[in-house]
Amino acid sequence: MTPVGLLFKVNSEGLFTCPVNASPVDYAKIYPDPESEKAIMGSVVYCIHHKEGCQWSDELRKLKAHLNTCKHDAVLCAAHCGAMIPRVLMQDHLRYTCPRRRANCEHCHTEFSGSALEEHQGNCGHEPIYCENKCGAKVQRRHTQQHLQQHCSKRLVPCRHCGQKYTQDTVCAHGEGCARAPVPCPQRCAAPVPRDLLDAHLRDHCTAAALPCSFRDAGCRFKGSRQAVERHTEESCAQHLCLVSAVAARQARQLDALRAAVARLSLNCTGALVWRIADWTAKMAEAKCKDGVELVSPAFYTSQYGYKLQASLFLNGNGAGESTHMSVYIKILPGEYDALLRWPFAHTVSFTLFDQSSSPDRACNIVESFVPDPTWKNFQRPSKEPDALGFGFPRFVSHEMLKKRNFVKDDIMFLRVKVDPSKIVAV
């Protein structure tokens, strides 16, 4: 026979319940036959707490008696809190969760009821908690403020030298290098000096420091106390004047050497000069008012160790071009390397007056060139005084032509002088 407990559930009062809706079922109506009833009551069933772990199984008539002692069956709380608690969990309930239990706080040992203990936990002044500054210490809750103010290694304390605040565990290390911390004077004078003022102290105030003479850069080697240096300065004016004069002379020689070096570096050694003549209108007016007004260009070299040349320009003409043309000439100046050069000078020289037209394709430059005549004295090795005029073109360009095109633009004219050693025919 199938145990009834497998088909119908039996509640704690021994009544059958429907397995679908848990409503009470009268087994007499299910089995009206007395013989059947007897058979049912003698059938074997499992405890209703079988799934909770109870291993009991026996005749149905013994189930109610078993439930009176089954450790998994729920009964009213022994402390009368109203909860139904399985017998097996009763001790834990009475000890830990029952609202009417009595328990002592593990920190302050005060007795509380269950609900009062839950409210007390987390607020007990005797409970040790970690410091909120994360110093790692655990202190009782009631002592936290005192700990934060007096004992915490992470509390902020001011440096006694500079006043800046640091944590307690770093303020000592800061003090060792604090700029305002006093340090002994290296010259062993009386008072300690703040670290950041030590240099100023040694320079301006230390009475024990051996100070150099204020003319040390001029060569004076005297050293002594501040009073001794002042006395030395007053008594050694003549000596110091001689030292300063020697320094001034030495610096003058150095300046001359530097000027010469700069001049050498700024020399044009390309063999070509683009001469920029500014303020052309004013210079032309001056040339027309005065006779023989000559403009001279910066000197330039044909190469680093070559011939030294200079161009000259007569805006109102010279010789055959006077008053009608602009004249241009080239002069050979005495150079540093003339002894190593071939004479007479034989390089082709060309003059180019640039047309400053806004359209480069339409520009029409004026170009004149010549090959030096070796018989002319102008191309021999120059003496200390160069030829007064040089060699060139007295009728280089007419004044009328200057007005027709853009040879003068924004009151500026550009003239190129080029020496070409590779050409032997003028073009």
Image (cartoon, helix red, strand yellow):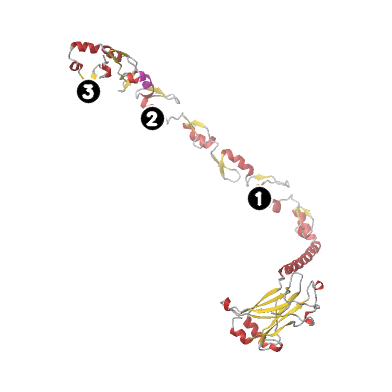
Q: Residue at x 71, y 69 (%)?
A: 266
- In the image, residue 140 above or below residue 276: above
Which callout, 3 or 2, points to the residue nearer the camera? Answer: 3
Write down the residue under mark 3.
23
Helix, strand or loop at label 1? It is: helix
What kind of residue is marked 1?
Leu
- Within 10 Å of disc 1 (Cα), the crowding (few <14, some 14-19, many 20+) is some
Image quadrant where residue 250 sits: bottom right
- In the image, residue 396 above or below residue 271: below
Q: Earlier in the sequence, mark 3 or mark 2?
A: 3
Q: Earlier in the sequence, mark 1 or mark 2?
A: 2
Q: Which mark is residue 197?
A: 1
Write down the region rendered in magenta. 88-94
**Magenta residues: mostly which secondary structure?**
helix
- Within 10 Å of disc 2 (Cα), the crowding (few <14, some 14-19, many 20+) is few
C-alpha gap between disc 1 and disc 2: 61 Å
Question: x%, y% of residue 350?
Answer: 69, 78
Which quarter of the figure is the C terminus placed in? bottom right
Image quadrant where residue 87 sits: top left
Give the side of residue 294 with respect to residue 10, left or right.
right
- In the image, residue 27 above or below residue 251: above
C-beta proximity under 8 Å, tags 1 and 3 = no
Which quarter of the figure is the N terminus placed in? top left
